[in-house]
């Protein structure tokens, strides 16, 4: 990694951006655009709430971050070690008194099943769900510098599959982590959609057996390749919608109309990415646009913030915002670990 990238502090910027987007979108989730404007005023002037509370999106991101830190303390990341620690962290999150931010039902049901330690984690995975809970928390896997491509992709899909077993949830989480990694490494953002499409095509039929085990057999698919291909094809469709939206940018229009409301994984990824790319040099405006959407505003803004922070670093965010975001010390500690 070059001195320039180290100086950028991509991990710290991404984690702070993720949490800031989450907090900005927390009060606007479940609201339509007129209601948001009535509540918050002009969207380009939206202010971070005070206190700046986050949702389960940031809480679960931190849970995954802690699991990664512990799993890598004694050596290279492996499926068995990550599954053990991520499982424990997810269950602990589900039982925490701070888990009072309207968490998704899929995560709660899966975590109850993950708590049954004698059962394989695949028994807990909700095979019909591709909710955005699979990829709202995956950013740490794009920020840990010690991982190779196989580890990053396999781990991104595994952490998603612990709760959301639909192949699109797995593919979208992998794609989100890859996007964060590319931006942290200094990739040219306007070429990002093309790079992500290439990545999706390269991985379209590849099932990570070492990381996922027999998960595909819990579905109705005839083969592992058929299972995972379904997920990548839906992500490719989502990327096509992003590309189409960028051909005729409309910053004042609700991004959800172009790429979806974000309640499911590929739409959350696509709409968060679109918000980032629409306001590439205005990261705070990107967060505000993502928070003023008719869909899953906190998750969309969370992902937009992860992308913008990975690209710009923590300098993207107003100091008065970053200093008072909930879990600030945890976010900065993890970011500093991976930036180092």
Image: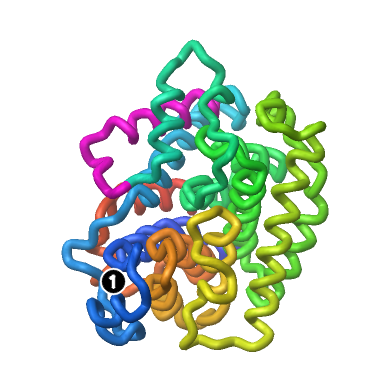
* Colour scheme of the picture: rainbow
65 in relation to 121, above or below: below
* x, y percent for residue 313: 46, 67
Query: Residue placed farthest to the top in the image?
Result: 118
Name the residue located 75 percent from the left edge and 69 percent from the top edge: 194
* x, y percent for residue 74: 52, 25
Secondary structure of the magenta portion, mostly? helix
Quadrant in the picture for residue 103: top left
Instruction: Give the left or right position of residue 252, taking residue 141 as reference.
Output: left
Instruction: Give yes or no for residue 290 being in the magenta stretch.
Output: no
Of 75 and 294, the residue lying toward us? 294
Q: Is residue 340 visible?
A: no
29 in relation to 217, above or below: below
Q: Quadrant of the N terminus?
A: bottom right
Quadrant in the picture for residue 82: top right
* x, y percent for residue 329: 28, 50
Q: Which residues are magenta?
A: 81-102
43 in relation to 206, above or below: below
Of 311 and 153, the residue lying toward us? 153
Quadrant in the picture for residue 100: top left
Instruction: Give yes or no for residue 83 being in the magenta stretch.
Output: yes
Q: Secondary structure at mark 1?
A: helix
Query: Residue placed farthest to the front in the image?
Result: 220
Name the residue located 46 percent from the left edge and 64 percent from the top edge: 300
Instruction: Give the left or right position of residue 313, taking residue 194 as reference.
Output: left
Q: Which residue is mark 1?
A: 319
């Amino acid at each position: 990694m070059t001195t320039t990238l180290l100086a950028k502090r991509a991990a710290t910027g991404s984690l702070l951006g993720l949490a800031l987007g989450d907090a900005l979108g927390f009060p606007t989730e479940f609201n339509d655009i007129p209601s948001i404007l009535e509540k918050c005023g002009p969207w380009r002037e939206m202010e971070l709430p005070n206190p700046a509370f986050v949702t389960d999106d940031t809480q679960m991101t931190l849970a995954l971050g802690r699991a990664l830190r512990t799993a890598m303390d004694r050596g290279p990341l492996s499926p068995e070690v990550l599954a053990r620690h991520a499982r424990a962290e997810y269950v602990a999150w589900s039982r925490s008194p701070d888990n009072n931010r309207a968490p998704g039902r899929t995560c709660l049901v899966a975590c109850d099943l993950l708590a049954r330690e004698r059962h394989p984690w695949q028994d807990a995975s909700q095979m019909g769900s591709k909710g955005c809970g699979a990829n709202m928390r995956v950013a740490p896997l794009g920020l840990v510098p010690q991982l190779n491509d196989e580890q990053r992709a396999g781990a991104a899909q595994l952490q998603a599959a612990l709760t959301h077993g639909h192949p699109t949830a797995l593919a979208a989480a992998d794609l989100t982590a890859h996007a964060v990694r590319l931006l942290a490494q200094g990739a040219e953002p306007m070429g990002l959609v093309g790079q992500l499409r290439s990545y999706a095509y390269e991985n379209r039929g590849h099932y990570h057996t070492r990381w996922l085990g027999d998960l595909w057999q819990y579905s109705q698919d005839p083969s592992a390749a058929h299972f995972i291909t379904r997920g990548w094809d839906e992500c490719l469709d989502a990327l096509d919608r992003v590309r189409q939206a960028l051909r005729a940018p409309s910053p004042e229009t609700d991004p959800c109309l172009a790429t979806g409301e974000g309640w499911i994984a590929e739409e959350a990824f696509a709409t968060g990415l679109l918000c980032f790319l629409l306001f590439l040099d205005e990261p705070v405006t990107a967060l505000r646009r993502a928070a003023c959407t008719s869909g899953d505003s906190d998750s969309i803004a969370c992902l937009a913030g992860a992308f913008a922070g990975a690209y710009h670093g923590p300098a993207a965010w107003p100091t008065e915002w970053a200093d008072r975001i909930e879990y600030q010390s945890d976010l900065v500690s993890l970011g500093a670990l991976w930036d180092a």
